[in-house]
Image (cartoon, helix red, strand yellow):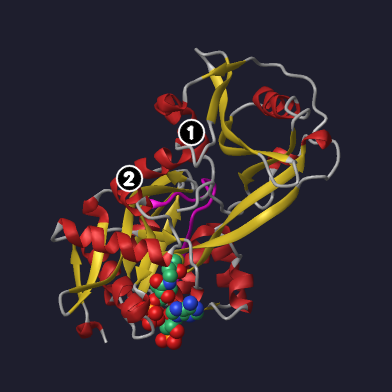
Amino acid sequence: MISKFEYATLAHAEDAQHLGHILEQCYIMSAGDSELYINRVGLENLRILYQNQQVVGGLAILPMGQWWGGQCVPMMGIAAVGIAPEYRGSGAAIALMQNTLKQLHTQGVPISVLYPATQRLYRKAGYEQAGSYCIWEVLTENIQIKEQPLPLQFVAPSNYEAFYELYQQQAKITHGYLDRNQAIWLGLIRPEDQETVYSYFIGDKDQPQGYIIFSQHSTEDDSAILRVRDWVILTDAAMQTFWSFLANHRSQIKKVRWKSSVIDSLTLPLPEQTANIWRQERWMLRVIDVVKALELRGYPPGIQTELHLEVKDDLLTSNNGKFILSVANGHGEVRTGGKGELQLDIRGLAPLYTSLFTPYQLQLSGKLQATETVLSVATQIFAGVSPWMANFF
Ligand SMILES: CC(C)(COP(=O)(O)OP(=O)(O)OC[C@H]1O[C@@H](n2cnc3c(N)ncnc32)[C@H](O)[C@@H]1OP(=O)(O)O)[C@@H](O)C(=O)NCCC(=O)NCCS
């Protein structure tokens, strides 16, 4: 099937324009929006699929990192996968994904993440569910937190680089958080339509303890919404200030929305359980290089043990085989060989790696096989809070 198509990085500028038109049609975008998107992502990060010299479709690669166990693992985000409608249903998308993954493997990339419009396609390419993206909502009248221990300092959103260091502190300790690509930062501060983006440090300018970036939207039923586009909260004083600041919008703003984990600690200071998840999705991860992925992430510091895995990967064949993962002092080392006591397909490795599901749950859903003893070793190694990230791409 792959031979029907030709895969390439961008050869001619007019092909980017052609791909832009396909993406506009695929994603129901306004004319011209793809140009903004492509400029943000960078021409060098586009991949194109041709058939008889015609552009059939393509995708964007977003070079990033992702925090796992306190370590930042190099990660390639995949976005804007699109195939022109007249070429659909004949294996174009899977050919595009398989070629991309082979290329990333050759480049030594450990992992890749994407948001699926359909799981079937990406499962075929070796991705599996690996973490959450949740938008929470609360009525401003239900926040009822009045004390504001810290001042807020306005920062022009165009100075968003001032937020990097604070973001990094939160990212490091949040299982699944991104080391963001520039395109994602730009998306956070870019106003849509006629809206304005506002941003503030929480705390003193010299020693901020967090920040908030948001925009305000009126709705048809006259109940305005404040959307928190991004937040960092590093202290309990910053948490209180965040809530009281939002509550003080209640004369005009009916609801506040923010992104957080499925189990959201931001909701803990609220007086009642009045916050709800408004939207929830799971992103998918693919382990591209088993050895690198396992060695580059961090592990719980207090354990010293070994896990013998046997991995099956039909696409990237060097991932096939038996591996021994030795964990000590929060680090993992991998060598080939061993007893292959935990058997899994490359897809099953994704939610195990990210701790979205426990090894027991993965065994129950047919994603891996192991004895009780081996499952409990795997449970210790891959223990972690529910993985999530605050960005959709
Ligand atoms: C989704 C899209 C990329 C699929 O392209 P395509 O070339 O038709 O896909 P393929 O022919 O390579 O299909 C590969 C596999 O995915 C499955 N698949 C493709 N589109 C699917 C869909 N919308 N729903 C469920 N499964 C789908 C196919 O059935 C096939 O699996 P199978 O061989 O087991 O039957 C294309 O429909 C598209 O561009 N859509 C608009 C943009 C979009 O939604 N992109 C995805 C964003 S994550």
What is the span of residues highlighted in magenta in the rendered image?
A: 296-310
Q: Which residue is mark 2?
A: 40
Q: Rounded to the nearest whole Å, what is the CA distance between mark 2 and mark 1?
A: 21 Å
Specify whether tag 2 is near ligand 1 (CB below 8 Å). Answer: no
Q: Is residue 14 left or right of residue 21?
A: left
Residue at horizontal 61 percent and vertical 51 percent from the top: 385
Residue at horizontal 46 percent and vertical 27 percent from the top: 157
Residue 203 placed where, x, y %? 59, 17
Hey, what amino acid is under mark 1? Tyr
Q: Quadrant of the N terminus?
A: bottom left
Q: Which residue is mark 1?
A: 167
Residue 320 placed where, x, y %? 33, 77
Residue contact at pointers 2 and 1, CB within 8 angstroms: no
Q: Which mark is residue 334?
A: none
Residue 9 placed where, x, y %? 19, 62
Density class for disc 2 (Cα within 10 Å; few <14, some 14-19, many ≥20) is: some
In depth, the one of 211 and 286 nearer the eye is: 211
Q: Secondary structure at mark 1?
A: helix
